[in-house]
Image (cartoon, rainbow, N blue to C red):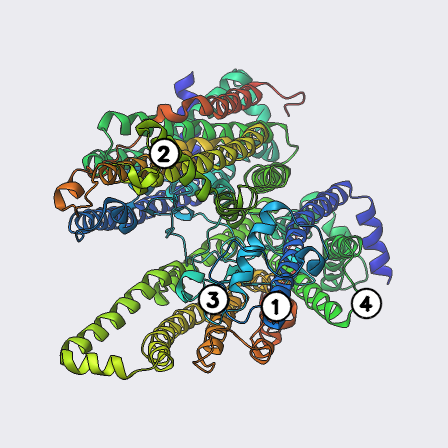
């Protein structure tokens, strides 16, 4: 029986040449977009790699100078992008690609990829992920809006129902057909992505198993989301008095769930939990150091404290009598002080971002698109958390480099200028792409929303409406 | 009038229509609120920066007029000879006192004044709430980067990247993207609905022109949409304290209304054309949705890709690196020159020079060439951005969605061209500011009252005063032409097809 219904549904779809043509065109569009994404990734990854190599060479070939001067010569780090950037660029284009590491101050990441790009209508569907998550539901609606109401309009619904098939079975067959179509549309680009991704894992610093642990859930989440849309289309179509009404209701739902609610959610999240201006944070940091000690410089206080500490330790009455490079010890103390201020500010920012994220996650219960965007960017490794993971790794590297240089100066009492051996003692920055576990705890919420969306809409579609004909 | 009354009566009984209008009104109010809250933040920042810059100016003025210290101080720890709380007429906390104490030391020196925290910023437009525009992507304020002009254009930004990814729901996005969907819902069946219900024959039996009747119906239905949006926007402006008695603001509001009417009429004309084909309501809705996908999603995306490809630009924040390169090149050239000069000659030359001559040559050989080179680079970068913006404006004719979005962005003062203009003006101001101090007589290390009075001051003009009326006119004309074409085609082919 199932097979008969499935065959009938598929035949009905194939008869609609416009829709079949639309589906094929859409798949071509997604593949073209994926091809563009892969080309962009390869270009960006190659550029970043080459710049990173140059930066390392620049560090190793610097002139003879003191260790601390070398920290001001600095190191440039270039972000390592996830291969899944080709599928879902997420937030990566608006975040930086380069960070300069120097002592005293952690610099923000600069040179985002999207600088200078055009945002014509503030409505971006330029990546395969956005095409599948934002535009494909429209096609799904066109596939399903007249699935039941069309029969009703044409007066063939009583005929279908009189053929002995139960409502639930009929709906389940339609759902199976829809899911098969979604799977077919998803399979081609995602299989290509996985196949291509496995070939670039070494350069990207990600293992094949980790890549697959991202691609498979990504595909499943997209399937759940699109499946939900197809079930909603069926449910609305079976309840609407006409195909016209069904289409209007579905269009309204699409606009509401995909455009209005997500944008309102992020806007209200910003209003509820406003972020400070970056320049205010910089100024606060500067002022805490410059004038934070009774309106005077903290640095003076630190110098006094360091001198005092070592004078007591060595039992001398003047800092000049100390057999140490006191400037290096003072600079280490300054570094500890500035790191502490930075850590406080970073923790405060993290708290604000997390609060905004919680608000958006709550709203995703009424707009599963938000849940899918969270999951999609997280599995693709292109969200803020992954960006921060890179930045934090860079920050740890900076602290290690500065400490190594200052420590060298501290024992270098006769102030000999070091050579390439010291520069080479700082290992090259080796970034391993983090596993998805780093934010799995946060992702359970959106995952439950998506699962509830799939099951809830599926249940709604299989429930028979009060008036079937 | 009879037709109007009849249509009004029919419409009054149409509950779905009123629910649609209610939804549209609510969404418009929400989008306006979002735009307004952002505009509020811009206005607050404007006020804050005005006050901050006024205090800084006052500090420099006081320092310049102060005769107790003739020379630039050598210590930063000494308190200024004036009571700063009295000067600014407000209490200062410990950190502020410390900051102003340091700033006082910079406030008199000819070479140190550029190191004070000067800034440029965009002043909000009276219709700022209409569109977020490019404000998420372009800075609306800059901290003037001392003698480093390129660094000025690398402002650190802090925003939730998730928001940048999802986008903002402002009034311009609502009108451009969602308003057509409302028109589709209201008008896709304004003829076909009657055909499907079987009432078309009844209508045709009346002694009235079919086209006239349908046109009246279309206009009555669409006027509800236009009025809803306009009423909410005007009420919002009044409630938020916008001065609508100001002639300039009224003119801007007039342009907005005209654009809104033209854009809504365009989508009504599409409905008119589609209904003239004699298809079913469902097919009409599908066709109109396809049209929406092409005009609102596909065309803008395609056009922006083409424009970006044809008019490549470099990010503004690479100017800082460019400046380092320029300085290195100039330094290298100077070292080369020195290497070519015999050492004895160079030593004799150095001995001959007075301090004044040395400063003079330093400014002439270092500062001025560096500033001129980076200014030329900045000018070139902005020219590239401007030509990209012009190309985008020219593309407004390819999609009415472009034209309405561009109009809203222009009126709100957040368009791409206005953002570029603001950044360009910042560059110009910075160059003029530095040139002022370079041109002073070289013997003085502090500035005089006269020099201070001639010092360039950044005066932000409200964004709506710098609007290009020509661009607005072109956009409105584009919208009018777009509306006319489908309407005329539909008018020619409009037949009362019964089947």
The tag on residue B460 is 1
Please, what secondary structure does the residue beneath circle 4 have?
Answer: loop
Q: Of the residues under marks 3 and 1, which one precedes in the sequence?
A: 3
x, y percent for residue B358: 33, 78
Q: Which residue is mark 3?
A: B112
- State the residue in front, A320 or B246: A320
Residue with the mark numbered 4: B245
Q: Quadrant of residue B146?
A: bottom left
- Mark 1 secondary-structure assignment: loop
Answer yes or no: are tags 3 and 4 on the same subunit.
yes
Please indicate whether residue A87 sits to the left or right of residue A60 in the image: right
Residue that numbered label 2 is attached to: A389
Work out which quarter of the rendered image holds the C terminus of chain A and state it: top right
Looking at the image, is A417 positioned above or below residue B416? above
Asked whether the residues under marks 2 and 1 belong to the same chain, the reply is no
Q: Is residue B268 something one can see in this rendering?
A: no
Q: Which mark is residue A385?
A: none
Residue B207: quadrant of the picture: bottom right
- Measured Cα–Cα span from mark 2 to mark 3: 40 Å
Q: In the rendered structure, are the residues bearing label 2 and label 1 in contact, judged by CB atoms less than 8 Å apart?
A: no
């Amino acid at each position: 029986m199932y097979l008969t219904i499935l065959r009938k549904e598929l035949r009905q779809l194939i008869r609609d040449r416009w829709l079949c043509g639309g589906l094929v065109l859409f798949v071509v569009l997604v593949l073209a977009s994926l091809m563009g994404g892969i080309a962009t990734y390869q270009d960006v990854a190659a550029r970043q790699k080459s710049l990173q190599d140059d930066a390392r060479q620049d560090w190793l070939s610097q002139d003879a100078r003191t260790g601390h001067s070398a920290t001001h010569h600095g190191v440039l780090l270039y972000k390592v992008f996830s291969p899944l950037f080709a599928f879902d660029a997420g937030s990566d284009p608006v975040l930086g690609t380069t960070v300069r590491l120097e002592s005293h101050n952690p610099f923000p990441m600069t040179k985002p990829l999207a600088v200078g790009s055009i945002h014509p209508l503030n409505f971006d569907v330029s990546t395969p992920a956005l095409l599948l998550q934002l535009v494909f539901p429209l096609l799904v609606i066109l596939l399903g809006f007249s699935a039941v109401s069309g029969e009703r309009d044409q007066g063939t619904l009583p005929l279908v129902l009189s053929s002995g098939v139960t409502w639930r079975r009929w709906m389940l067959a339609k759902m199976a057909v829809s899911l098969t179509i979604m799977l077919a549309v998803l399979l081609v680009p995602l299989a290509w992505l996985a196949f291509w991704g496995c070939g670039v894992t070494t350069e990207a610093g990600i293992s094949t198993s980790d890549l697959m642990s991202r691609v498979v859930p990504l595909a499943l989440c997209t399937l759940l989301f699109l499946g939900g849309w197809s079930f909603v289309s069926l449910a609305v179509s079976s309840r609407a008095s006409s195909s016209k009404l069904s289409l209007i209701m579905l269009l309204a739902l699409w606009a509401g769930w995909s455009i209005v609610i997500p944008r309102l959610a992020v806007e209200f999240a910003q209003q509820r939990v406003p972020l400070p201006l970056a320049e205010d944070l910089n100024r606060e940091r500067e002022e805490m150091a410059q004038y934070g000690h009774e309106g005077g410089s903290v640095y003076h206080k630190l110098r006094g404290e360091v001198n005092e500490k070592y004078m007591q330790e060595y039992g001398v009455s003047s800092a000049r009598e100390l057999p140490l490079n006191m400037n290096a010890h003072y600079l280490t103390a300054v570094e500890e002080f500035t790191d502490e201020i930075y850590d406080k500010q970073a923790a405060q920012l993290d708290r604000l971002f997390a609060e905004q994220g919680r608000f958006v996650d709550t709203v995703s219960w009424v707009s599963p698109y938000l849940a899918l965007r969270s999951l999609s960017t997280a599995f693709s490794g292109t969200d803020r958390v992954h960006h921060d993971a890179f930045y934090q790794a860079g920050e740890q590297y900076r602290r290690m480099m500065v400490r190594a240089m200052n420590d060298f100066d501290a024992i270098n009492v006769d102030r000999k200028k070091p050579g390439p051996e010291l520069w080479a003692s700082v290992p090259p920055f080796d970034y391993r792409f983090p596993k998805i576990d780093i934010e799995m705890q946060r992702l359970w919420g959106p995952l439950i929303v998506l699962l509830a969306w799939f099951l809830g809409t599926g249940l709604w579609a299989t429930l028979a409406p009060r008036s079937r004909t | 009038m009879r037709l109007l009354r009849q249509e009004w009566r029919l419409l009054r009984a149409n509950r779905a229509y009123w629910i649609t209008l209610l939804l549209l009104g609510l969404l418009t109010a929400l989008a306006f609120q979002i735009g307004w809250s952002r505009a509020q933040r811009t206005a607050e920042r404007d006020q804050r920066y005005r006050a901050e810059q006024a205090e800084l100016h006052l500090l420099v003025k006081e320092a310049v007029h102060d005769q107790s210290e003739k020379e630039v101080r050598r210590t930063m720890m000494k308190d200024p000879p004036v009571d700063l709380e009295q000067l600014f007429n407000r209490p200062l906390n410990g950190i502020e006192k410390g900051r102003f104490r340091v700033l006082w030391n910079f406030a008199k020196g000819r070479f140190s004044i550029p190191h004070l925290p000067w800034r440029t910023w965009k002043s909000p437009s009276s219709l700022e709430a209409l569109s977020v525009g490019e404000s998420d992507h372009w800075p609306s304020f800059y901290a003037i980067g001392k003698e480093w002009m390129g660094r000025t254009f690398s402002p650190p930004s802090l925003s939730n990247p998730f928001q940048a990814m999802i986008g903002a729901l402002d009034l311009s996005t609502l009108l451009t993207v969602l308003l057509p969907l409302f028109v589709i819902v209201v008008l896709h069946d304004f003829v076909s609905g009657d055909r499907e219900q079987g009432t078309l024959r009844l209508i045709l039996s009346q002694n009235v022109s079919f086209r006239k009747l349908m046109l009246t119906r279309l206009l009555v239905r669409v006027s509800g949409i236009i009025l809803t949006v306009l009423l909410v926007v005007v009420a919002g402006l009044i409630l938020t304290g916008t001065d609508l008695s100001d002639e300039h603001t009224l003119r801007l509001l007039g342009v907005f209304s005209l654009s809104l009417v033209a854009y809504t009429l365009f989508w009504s004309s599409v409905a008119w054309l589609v209904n003239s084909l004699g298809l079913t309501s469902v097919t009409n809705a599908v066709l109109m949705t396809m049209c929406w996908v092409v005009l609102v999603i596909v065309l803008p995306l395609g056009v922006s890709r083409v424009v970006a490809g044809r008019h490549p630009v470099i990010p503004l924040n690479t100017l800082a690196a460019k400046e380092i390169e320029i300085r290195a090149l100039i330094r290298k050239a100077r070292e080369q020159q020195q290497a070519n000069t015999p050492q004895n000659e160079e030593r004799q030359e150095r001995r001959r020079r007075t301090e004044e001559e040395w400063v003079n040559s330093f400014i002439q050989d270092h500062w001025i060439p560096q500033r001129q080179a980076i200014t030329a680079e900045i000018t070139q970068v902005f020219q590239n951005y401007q030509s990209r913006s012009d190309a985008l404006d020219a593309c407004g004719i390819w999609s009415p969605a472009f034209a309405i979005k561009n109009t809203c962005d222009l009126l709100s003062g957040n368009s791409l061209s206005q953002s570029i203009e603001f950044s360009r003006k910042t560059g110009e101001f910075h160059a003029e500011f530095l040139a002022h101090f370079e041109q002073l007589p070289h013997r003085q290390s502090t500035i005089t009252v006269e020099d201070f009075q001639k010092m360039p001051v950044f005066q932000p003009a409200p964004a709506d005063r710098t609007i290009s009326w020509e661009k607005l006119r072109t956009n409105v004309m584009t919208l009018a032409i777009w509306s006319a074409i489908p309407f005329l085609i539909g008018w020619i082919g409009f037949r009362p097809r019964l089947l």
